[in-house]
Amino acid sequence: MAKDRILGIVQGGLFRRLTPIRDVAGGCRLTRAKAKDKSRSVDAKAIDLAPYEGIALLVEGRNEDLWVFDVKIVERAGPILSGLVQYVLGGGLSRFDALSEAEEAGQGAEQ
């Protein structure tokens, strides 16, 4: 079985899938555990997403409900591209909106 390529953004400690499927509410967790090892090592091999908060990630893995198994992080976007991904695919408040609000308040983009 081939792995899926999934584009998403990390929000609130969860990976919110944007393509090829979209998480309407919440998100999922990423793990290096194999899908067949669901009961044993899923949490132990879970990827800590805290360093990726607000960042768009392209991952390869086996996409199943609340988890993506056997994950490999293929690419990590920088802050500008992450904001663009969230703005175009995620809807709602994005980093671009936050920057615009800061500029209107006279704070500029140097934050």
Image (tube, rainbow, N blue to C red):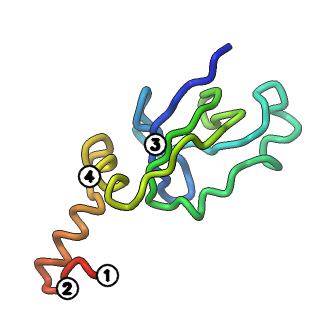
In the rendered structure, which amino acid carries the disc numbered 4? Gly
The earlier-in-sequence mark between 4 and 3 is 3
Describe residue 4's horizontal placement relative to residue 111 as left or right.
right
Describe residue 92's horizontal placement relative to residue 101 as left or right.
right
Q: Are marks 3 and 2 in contact (CB under 8 Å)?
A: no
- Point out the frontmost of discs 1 and 3: 1
Which residue is more in the foreground, 68 or 77?
Answer: 77
- What residue would you read off at disc 1? 111
- Estimate the spatial distance between the alpha carbons at disc 3 and disc 2, rounded to whole Å: 29 Å
Residue at the spot 50% in from the left edge and 61% down from the top edge: 53
- Point out the frontmost of discs 4 and 1: 1
- What residue would you read off at disc 3? 8
The earlier-in-sequence mark between 4 and 1 is 4
Instruction: Indicate the secondary structure of the residue bearing disc 1.
Output: loop
The earlier-in-sequence mark between 2 and 4 is 4
- Residue lying farthest to the top in this orientation: 1
The earlier-in-sequence mark between 3 and 2 is 3
Q: Position of residue 22 (x, y in %)?
A: 41, 33
Residue 50, relative to residue 64: is it above or below? below
Describe residue 52's horizontal placement relative to residue 9 as left or right.
right
Question: How many other residues sit within 10 Å of disc 4, few (<14), some (14-19) or many (≥20)?
Answer: few
In the image, which disc is placed on residue 92? 4
Residue at the spot 44% in from the left edge and 60% down from the top edge: 54
The answer to which image quadrant residue 66 occupies is top right
- What residue would you read off at disc 2? 107
